Amino acid sequence: MKRIFALAAVLILAASTWAADGKTVSYKSGDETVQGTLYTPSGKGPFPALIVIHEWWGLNDWVKEQASKLSDQGYVTLAVDLYRGKVATTPDMAHEIMRGVPEDRAKRDLHAAFEFLAAQPNVKKDRIGAIGWCMGGGYSLDVALQEPTLAADVINYGHLATDPEALKKIHAPILGLFGAQDRGIPPADVRKFGESLEQIGKKIEIKIYDDAGHAFENPNNKDGYREADAADAWKRTVEFLAMNLKK
């Protein structure tokens, strides 16, 4: 899985001036205490909720902005921090930090995030979803694999699985957004993933953007950002989440 994201080294992480308006929260993950950034919609709950999972850069301002924008759509959002406070500023640093994250610890942290949201009095316990990009897209799929009551899952160019026995564990409808020019996740693999889920009766919607590569939704990816495709991906995400989490 991790080798895929080394191909995202074309990204140039631009300095962001966006100011986060979320609240830092702490919660238990096994014997450890971890932190995330929580965003709450205006108005009276309870609300549906989302686990928001960062790219290989870490929990930076762009991911916090996505969590804030999704909160504006009516979701309690928890932007998790799988790097425990570290944020990369170069591709080499991102690759090094990512490689140092034990996969079992990350999955434990994501389960803890799910449990944290489910315990909030302003969250609808049966309307929790997950979304992630790049590395986080792969982990978003992992959330669907390990949380049987997850209500929706969005995978933005993240690693895939095709083992039928593993895929049987998924109960959440899935939206997958990918670039046809992504050298780490080729369209053939994406289609196989979708076909594997359809064959076992799972709900899956996939969009492959012909002229896009990896990380095409992030404007900090100066060479790979595709504005029109990113806008379409956002529209599809908003509609998909509303259909599955607000009904």
Image (cartoon, grey):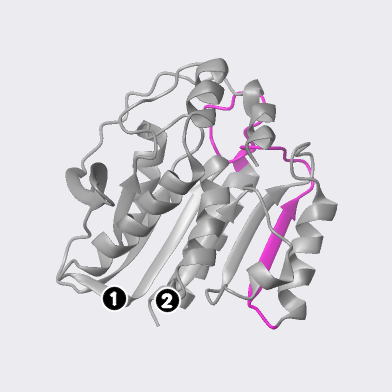
Number of the label disc, if any, that sits on residue 149 = 2
Over which residues does the magenta segment extend? 201-227
Distance from Cα at disc 2 to Cα at disc 1: 9 Å
Q: Which residue is mark 1?
A: 125
Seen at 65% across and 48% down, the residue is 159
Please give the count of numbered marks on the rendered protein.
Answer: 2
Residue 223 magenta: yes
Q: Confirm or deny contact between disc 2 and disc 1 (CB under 8 A).
A: yes
Residue 56 screen position, x and y as percent: 51, 33
| Label 2 crowd bin: few (<14), some (14–19), many (20+), radius 10 Å | some
Q: Amino acid at mark 2?
A: Thr
Image-based side of 191 in relation to 60, left or right: right
Q: Is residue 79 visible?
A: yes
Residue 42 screen position, x and y as percent: 18, 61
Image-based side of 239 in relation to 195, left or right: left
Q: Quadrant of residue 40?
A: bottom left
